[in-house]
Image: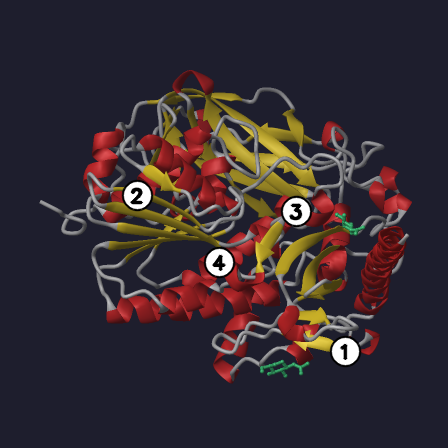
Amino acid sequence: MKSGSILKHGLIILSLFGLIFLLHNITNRENWKYHTVSAMYKFQDRIFCSHLGQPPSPEEELEERDILDSIAWPQPPWSAAPPALCRTSDPARSLFTIVPSQNGRRRYVGDQLEVLVHLHDFEGRPKRYGGDFLLARLHSPEYKAGVAGQVLDHKNGLYSARFPLLWEGSAQVEVTMVHSSEAVAVLRRLREKRPDRVYFVSLFRLGLHSETTVCNVCLPRDQGPLCNYTDPYSGEPWYCYKPKMLGCDARINHAKGGYLKNVITNKEALLFQSDVNVKVPIHASTTDTINVLPFRKESGSPKTDPVKMATSGYYYQDSWRPLGGVPMRQFDGASAIAQCLTNKVVYMYGDSTVRQWFEYLLNALPDMKEFNLQTPKKVGPLMAVDSTHNILLKYRCHGPPIRFSTVTASELRYIANELDGLAGGPNTVVALSIWSHFSTFPAEVYVRRLRHIRKAVARLLDRAPGTAVAVRTANPQALEGDVSLYNSDWFSLQLDAVLRAVFKGLDVMLVDAWQMCVAHRQPHHLHPPTAIVKNMVDMMLSYVCRDGAGNNV
Ligand SMILES: *[C@@H]1O[C@H](CO)[C@@H](O)[C@H](O)[C@H]1NC(C)=O
Ligand SMILES: *[C@@H]1O[C@H](CO)[C@@H](O)[C@H](O)[C@H]1NC(C)=O
């Protein structure tokens, strides 16, 4: 039977194909697992990417050194063996005390409050060195008011937290130990030596053949040939291992590969226990509450009060009130927002924390319709149009490293290059947020990225004065489980400081997401709740539609 034999042959050929497919899949998966493991080894010897990127100019190198100096964190006093858990900081046995006001006089709005924090170890002994990571907040639940404290490390186990007193009535102090100094030492080592602890992959495909390989800002070179995807315009480095059978042009996409486990020892893991020593409150020795009386002329600290200067704002009735800068307006209701944004294009570039702004504006404006680009909701690019008010919203994620599920290779764009493609002008609004996906890398990687973005922002503002640029800073988040090892607030705080330093002096609005989240009554979350996002967007809109700008009348 002829047709039967053809069928048989066909089946055999088909199953052969299947087998080849299956084998392919297996070898590919093994292939990138193998690469990951060997990458791990190499990073431990600290062969970080300096040789894989363009060297900075002498001025850039100087700036980089200044920035890195400014985020220096106290080094632990031990060099070889860290102390046993019982000798490390224990928030439950630590205490804070409100420092009595001068001559026991009353406190008034405009004064400063100081709190002294004493750290103790798990056996109740006072700590003798600094480096613990504390957050402090003064708040009044009945007014939905709150302000972040400025924490000063005395490097002997004592810390001061200082707050400007900005509203009257009863207020409570809250001090939290985010990490012990011993945990920070582990995080510092991870950041410098294990930037591979979050790894990335790309799929390569040509016809029926596909392979997946590991990618990163830098990769050990002795593990096989590399594909060099270094950006020709900005010089941002990016590499993947070259697929065995395919060329580098066959790259289809980029995705988060995963989180490497077992990056710390069992002993070190004791320093990262939720409810024990990660983000745990420190209690007051006596009271945590003060009473603040209305402002009097003769009270009040001088205008140059450093604590007040370091405080960017505070909440009252859940509204953010910035101290200095552009006056804040509340954009309550769609018409206020639509009026401000009429005839404008808003470009949002970055991570998911600025995608939240896109989502917020889309929800807040009833005439805003999302244009279905048929891209994944959490990846983008996204676009929305309000043709009644002639408003266009666009969102695009930043270039690699980005831990999104799957980004098409052709959609991988660097913010600096996107900005260079904008004409700009008074009808252009740019909102940037780039921080979270850099937490696993040494600060140098972030400095380089921000430097490229700053240069592009400066070019944009030079060619099109009147362009409104808002930059959102980093924020604290929930640190359950082993999240700290990849996304600790300590990494974020350091990135936050880098970002402020890089954009200092540029005519952009910095939206202080850090203090806006520390000061708020809701728990920390990587994606802050709408109450906070509203204040961030209101801040941006206040800047866009400040006097003399954004006037569409
Ligand atoms: C290959 O592996 C991927 C992911 O591991 C899976 O989704 C796909 O179905 C596999 N393909 C074949 C032919 O086995
Ligand atoms: C990758 O390409 C960039 C720019 O083309 C170059 O500067 C860099 O040296 C290359 N990297 C390697 C490892 O060859």
Quadrant location of the C terminus in the rendered image: top left
Place of residue 461 in the rendered image (x, y in percent of width and height, measured from the top left): 28, 66
**Colouring of the image:** secondary structure
Check disc 2 and give the amino acid type.
Val
Q: In which quarter of the image is residue 34?
A: bottom right
- Circle 1: residue type: Pro
Q: Is residue 535 in sight in this rendering?
A: no
Mark 3 vs 1, N-terminal side? 1
Mark 2 Cα-neighbour bin, 10 Å: few <14, some 14–19, many ≥20: some
Q: Which mark is residue 225?
A: 1
Q: In this view, does 98 lie above or below 48?
A: above
Residue at the disc numbered 3: 487
For this view, does 351 lie left or right of residue 368? right
**What's the distance in space between the residues labelled 2 and 4, CA to CA?**
31 Å
Q: Residue 396 location, x and y as percent?
A: 45, 53
| Amino acid type for the residue under numbered disc 3 | Asn
Q: Residue 385 carries which label?
A: 2
Q: Which of marks 3 and 4 is in front?
A: 3
Marks 3 and 4 sit apart, C-alpha to C-alpha, by 17 Å
Mark 4 or mark 3, which is nearer the start of the sequence?
3
CA neighbours of label 4 inside 10 A, class few (<14), some (14 to 19), many (20+): many
Nearer to us of marks 2 and 4 is 2
Within 10 Å of the Cα at label 3, are there few (<14), some (14-19), or many (20+) other Cα atoms? Answer: many
Q: Between residues 164 and 4, which one lies in front from this camera angle?
A: 4
Residue denoted by label 4: 499
